[in-house]
Image: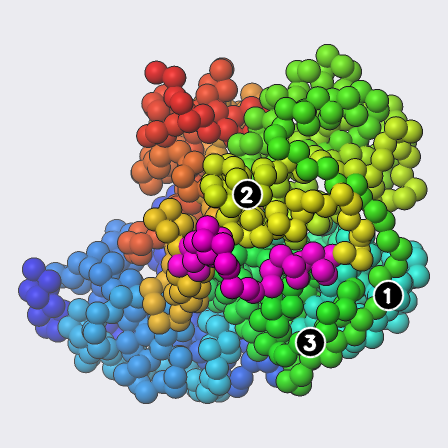
Amino acid sequence: MLRKRSKNVSSVAVKPYAACPAKSFTAADGRIRLGRSVESHCQIVGEVAKELIRRFPLKGIFPQGAAYLAATHDIGKVSPTFFNKIMRACLLERIANINPDLEREWGGHAGVSQATAKAMGAPEYVPEILGQHHGFSPNLAGKRADAEVFGGTLWQKEREKLAKTLSESLDEDWPKIESVAQARLLAGLTSVADWIGSGHHFEDPEAPWKEKITQALDDAGFVPVSYQQNLSFEQVFGFAPRLAQSTLIEQASRPGVYVFEAPMGLGKTEAALYVAYQMLANGQASGIYFALPTQLTSNKIFERFQSFLASVLADDCHHRSLLLHANAWLFDTELGEEGRPGGAWFTQSKRGLLAPFAVGTIDQALMAAMNVKHGFVRAFGLAGKVVILDEIHTYDAYTSTLLDALVSLLRELHCTVIILSATLNQERRQDLLKRSVTSIGYPLITASNNDENIAHEVSVPAGKNSRVEIVIKPDEAAAIEHVLLCAEQGQQVLWIENTVKDAQKRYLDIAARAADLGVACGLLHSRFTANDRQQIEDKWVSLFGKSGWQDRQKQGRILVGTQVLEQSLDIDADFMVSRFAPTDMLLQRLGRLWRHSEAPRCSKAKPQAWVLAPALDAAIEAPETQFGASAYVYSPYVLCRSLEVWQDMKHVDLPKDIRSLIDRTYVSRTEQNASMSRWLRELEEGNRYRKGLNALRQLARIGLSEGGNTLPESKAQTRYSESESYEVLLLKAMTRNRAGDTATLTLLNGEQLELPLQRHKLTKPEWRQRTAVLMRQIVNVPQGDKPNALSMETLKSFGLGHCFYLGNPEWPEDESLLRVALVDASDRLQGVEHNDVHDKYALEYRDDLGYRVIKNREK
């Protein structure tokens, strides 16, 4: 069948490139009409790219010819199958015997662009960049540019004529690309220029377009930023810098990689931000991306980041208000095709990478180095920026491999990378820097600018030591009684578990009893909707932070949580219980105990932490039994090595003991004990339940490989553990009106939201507003806990395709991250048709417990 159509392709008259449409658009009356020609659209995208380059703060980062490269992205639309695709959408006359659906076999018109450029002898990397401009690698299966399915030699000649016309128009030729990093940068430029050039400014083919380039870039948020000059550290933050902060500022004077190891509470964040300010003010950086381990910590750090921006931006800075509000870049900018509601790039986590300033998760940054859909757009967004990687410690081998690759990529993209950690071992520091390091000092600054192959290590004074009493307990029963007693006395207590499920269980154990005692009890983890999470954060992080000091002694409180409580939050407890965890995690948690010496405290409080841990000998023999769920979150070998260090500990002096505790835990050694030797071997080689270090590193390398298949975001794990990659939209109800043209979604708070099934029924700002509301009803969950998928047709039948990205039909491997579930009156989750939402477990959602998996489903 395909062969028959192929013969017809070569026998039909060729369409001149000037007569080939690139777009269709929906007019005000709802009818689909012909949009711009391929030539016009390509010229627009080339000029958009030119203006993006002109506005980029760092000069010389893009090679000559980058704009022409972007312009040629769609030359593959000069092909019979794509021509018929547009004509069919507009109900116009098509070329006979040409099936436009065949395009799916080779990934659409982008594959034809790639084959065309290759046939024209384009420089290395150029054909692949054109082929990937929709985010994924097309499957050409050996097809050449003159293949009959692409129109044969006559259509190829038309594509070549178009490429020549664009070259003359832009006065450029294809660039010579020096490296993979530069290729990723140009691929990102090409995609973003295409998105902007496909926006509403350029839809009407009859309207002039050249004068709209400036406005389109302004509306997309690419507006130059200006700064106040010569501000001192004290002018920015309101206090003089400590010696450690001053030392980092002095060392980090040029783009490079800088590691700042220092205890919790020493002001690493302010030091990094001031370095960033100096880079920005001196024209050595294009912006800041502040990457944190979790969404919760990134939300809280944004408030500090916002205050910093308010101090350093010039008073007359354009878009000052846009840059100072977390959601403004998402909802007040118009990024064109992929950046609209329903597009792949309409999420705050991804759009922030293109903003001059953003706080986000490290996962988004890691994907800049991965062969994942639109990974190169992330690389483009990070280029030239100061990238602050906070709370970097001993990630697993998988994430560490990605992280090492990211740091190397950022160096090549002219970035300044500042790595902040309280607990980094020497081996990891060396891997990140790709430079030899020897110092065992602590605190320590290691500096390696991009022009040198050596690292400069500078020790700085540690400051005052504080002593924390450590009590090892075998189980939680005694700890629950003690926590309730402490809180009844008026103490502020943290209880940190290693899994969401255990945190939920502990909260249920404690909350009712706490209420009877007049003690407040809360739960904080990552599996709440954004609305509920913000309310919990605002309340509890404030109560345990400086802003809650005036209320601190009014009532005893217990806050139960997961690892989100150990990272980047300025919270201060009087007493703490922690489930046992690797040494670096325990030290992070202890940093939340008696954090501020001047905080008001209950008279009976003392700096003490109870650590729930099994006996060492039993743990070594059966770690999965003794450590429970923790042995699936962390390596059993690392847990046993950590327990060796902590089992007899009565107190720890911070920060004095940090370096020795880390080194004693992680130093390589030959194991004499048979069981420990087995756990070490399983750590390296894996077992039937988990992958070993070698396999994880190999998996990560596959994700980094440019030659393999592009990964959809649902498959692009950045952490090989409880990777929270699926988005679950939680609603009370979903209905359609009698006419079948409008869906009504009932939110968890009872409010109703109407979504017309036709996009043109609402304006772009109205769609953005509705999408913003729905995005706050989302919970991120791990793969095994996600509800069953709904078909794309079902999701579209409720208008959700206008708000969320549902996958690319031309890319078979792609899938939506979105799942939808209804919460019934008993808090259980149901399917849209009131059916089971999970094949094995019951699911529920409560505003105090969050998203919960119940393993023993009641039938």
Is 419 a magenta residue?
no
Residue 219 x/y as whole percent: 61, 58
The answer to whether residue 492 is above or below residue 149 is above
How far apart in space, not on screen, are marks 1 and 2 (Cα)? 38 Å
- Residue underneath mark 2: 617
| Crowd rating for badge 3 (residues with CA inside 10 Å; few <14, some 14–19, many 20+) | few
- Residue underneath mark 3: 438
Q: Which residues are magenta?
A: 658-685
Q: Pick whichever, 191 or 543, lies toward us.
A: 543
Residue 547 x/y as whole percent: 85, 38
Q: Quadrant of residue 165?
A: bottom left
Colour setup of the view: rainbow
Quadrant of the image containing the N terminus: bottom left
- Residue underneath mark 1: 461
Q: Earlier in the sequence, mark 1 or mark 2?
A: 1
Q: Is residue 349 left or right of residue 225?
A: left
Residue 619 visible in the current orientation: yes
How far apart in space, not on screen, are marks 2 and 3 (Cα)? 34 Å
Which disc is residue 96 wearing? Answer: none
| Crowd rating for badge 2 (residues with CA inside 10 Å; few <14, some 14–19, many 20+) | few
Seen at 78% across and 64% down, the residue is 443
The answer to whether residue 480 is above or below residue 317 is above
Q: Secondary structure at mark 3?
A: loop
Which of the two marks, 1 or 2, is nearer to us in this view?
A: 2
The answer to whether residue 305 is above or below residue 177 is above
Task: Check if mark 1's residue and mark 2's residue have beta carbons within 8 Å.
Answer: no
Q: Earlier in the sequence, mark 1 or mark 3?
A: 3
Q: Secondary structure at mark 1?
A: loop
Seen at 36% across and 81% down, the residue is 163
Is 681 a magenta residue?
yes
Q: Is residue 204 left or right of residue 250?
A: left
